[in-house]
Image: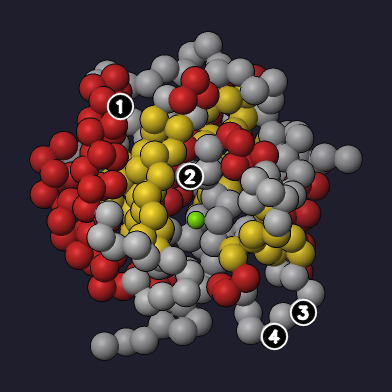
Amino acid sequence: MNTNHCRGVEIVFFTDIDDTLMQTKRKCPVGDSELIVGARDRDGNALSFLTKKQLALFQCMSKNTTVIPVTGRNLPALERTDIKLDCAPFRITGHGAEVTDAGGQVPSGWCPPEGHKQQQEQLQILSQQVHGWIKERPQLRVKLVTERDSVPVYLSVKGSRSTDNRQVLSAFIQQFSPVMKQWNWKIHSNGNNVALLPSFACKARAVRFVRQEIEKTSGNHLSIGAGDSHSDNDFLKECDFQMIPSNSQLATLLGNAHDAVSE
Ligand SMILES: [Mg+2]
């Protein structure tokens, strides 16, 4: 039974998924033989895994709080996770470009910000440019991530798992930074992944909206945000408490990572 209230205050857990609750095998602790499958690819093959501690955290939060995913995954990719999100009253997907309710519908008050149509057109153009740029760089692959009705929400570039892609990803960022700056978009880079994010894909804006919706029904509530990346930072600031994994981009930024190196 979900007991997501304490002393009359609802506790809401806004959580990123990848590299917070689960990660690909190569990012899991070496020698951990008790990994639990967390997400699958389209063919049903295991792709991401939870450690026992991550599973314990998720189960604890599921039992005691209202869990709301806040993820770069689109809805179909979120549905390919094995973690139980049935009770989530909202899902924030596509890096905050989309909010859906428990029934899979867009809440009536949720609307994209002004200028999002133009940004969607820019995404299509950018996608062609990036495809052209990576044509001779086969270690990279690009995907225009879409939400319902094939609406484009951001551009994802990933490096091959079998090569060291740091140089080529750095060159990619250098190549596309000027236009991102010009358009006031963000580049999110974490390890082998880079995302080119239009300003309408904003986790903080989506969390703000959901908090207002929750306030309508539950009044004041306690919010805890969990995330690992720079791109999570703004939505964590929307929450009363912030939780970050100790081996993460944000922890490294704070100098708190287990393997943090001071220079
Ligand atoms: Mg993450």
Residue situated furthest front in the rendering? 136
Which residue in the protein does label 4 denote?
A: 31
Is 66 displayed left or right of 19 in the figure?
right
Mark 4 and mark 2 lie on one chain; the one further toward the N terminus is 4
- The amino acid type, in three-letter code, at marker 1 is Gln
Is 205 displayed left or right of 167 in the figure?
right
Name the element at disc 3: loop
Q: On screen, 160 above or below 207?
A: below
Give neighbour class at mark 2: few <14, some 14-19, many 20+ (Cα, 10 Å): many
Q: Is residue 67 visible?
A: no
Residue 118 x %, y %: 23, 22
In whole angstroms, how far apart are the C-alphas of marks 3 and 2?
Answer: 28 Å
Mark 1 and mark 2 lie on one chain; the one further toward the N terminus is 2
- The amino acid type, in three-letter code, at marker 4 is Gly
Which residue in the protein does label 1 denote?
A: 120
Q: Are the residues flagged by discs 4 and 3 in contact, CB closer than 8 Å?
A: yes
Which residue in the protein does label 2 denote?
A: 72
Disc 2, ligand 1: is the CB inside 8 Å?
yes
Give neighbour class at mark 1: few <14, some 14-19, many 20+ (Cα, 10 Å): some
